[in-house]
Image (cartoon, rainbow, N blue to C red):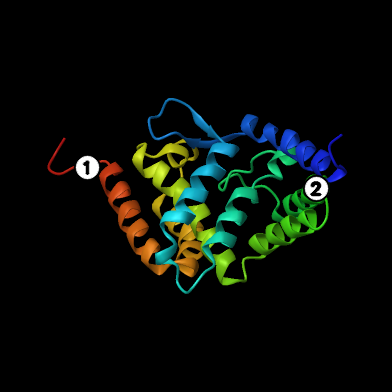
Amino acid sequence: MPSDTLVQQLAFLREIDRLKSVIRQSPLLDGSRKENSAEHSWHLAMYGLLLREHASSGVDSERVIKMLLIHDIVEVDVGDTPLHGGSSPTMQAELEHKAACRLFGLLPEPQGSEFLELWQEFEEGDSEDARFAKALDRVQPLIANVLTGGGTWSDGRVDLIQVLEKYGPTIRRGSPVLWSACEAMVREHFARDRPPSRTGSA
């Protein structure tokens, strides 16, 4: 018979399989469909693995990757909340905390507490590891929108100023180097997307 620890771990792994069914607004880079939250989390973990040298200060890459793998698990219960969706941050935070307690509570101790604490650290965004993880969580969809001709920005009629305000502070705080590269991409995108000015008479 499996141990109680193994039973709990397998139950958690079964439950988070539902993350594969949570559809985000961001498109895949080939434009064929929108990504799901499990794909997003995996892709972010790869960002954390490959881009750690660009953090604003020294980070523990293993902790960053753990945060990125678990940060959206709460979406199993609450679904995805688009960055430009306009939902109540307070209400969303309450729902997500309740979901985190339920989902990580499926795990045996001390794993359950470790995951919950890492999730809370990411949400608060005060540690160096969390700042870099949150920066990457903004970088990935930003790049997806640029490389798909606007993506969710076009769908939501989001302009340059809104993008700079929504993405800039978080990315810059975790990695000024990444923000410099992202800002250049964003400005180029919106300059290219702007209709040409009319000159001369009609």
Who's the residue at 59% across and 38% down the image? 38
**Residue extending furthest toward the bottom:** 57
Check disc 1 and report the residue beneath it: 196
Q: Which residue is mark 2?
A: 107
Query: Viewer-proximal residue, 39 or 96?
Result: 39
Q: Secondary structure at mark 2?
A: loop
Q: Which mark is residue 143?
A: none
Q: Can the viewer see residue 162 in this picture?
A: no
| Residue nearest the viewer, comparing 39 with 151 | 39
Q: Quadrant of residue 201?
A: top left
Give how far apart the Cα atoms at labels 2 and 1 are: 57 Å
On the image, the x and y values in percent for residue 41 come to 56, 44
Residue at the spot 66% in from the left edge and 35% down from the top edge: 19
Quarter of the image for the C terminus: give it: top left
Identify the residue at horizontal 39%, vertical 62% (top origin): 179
Amino acid of disc 2: Leu
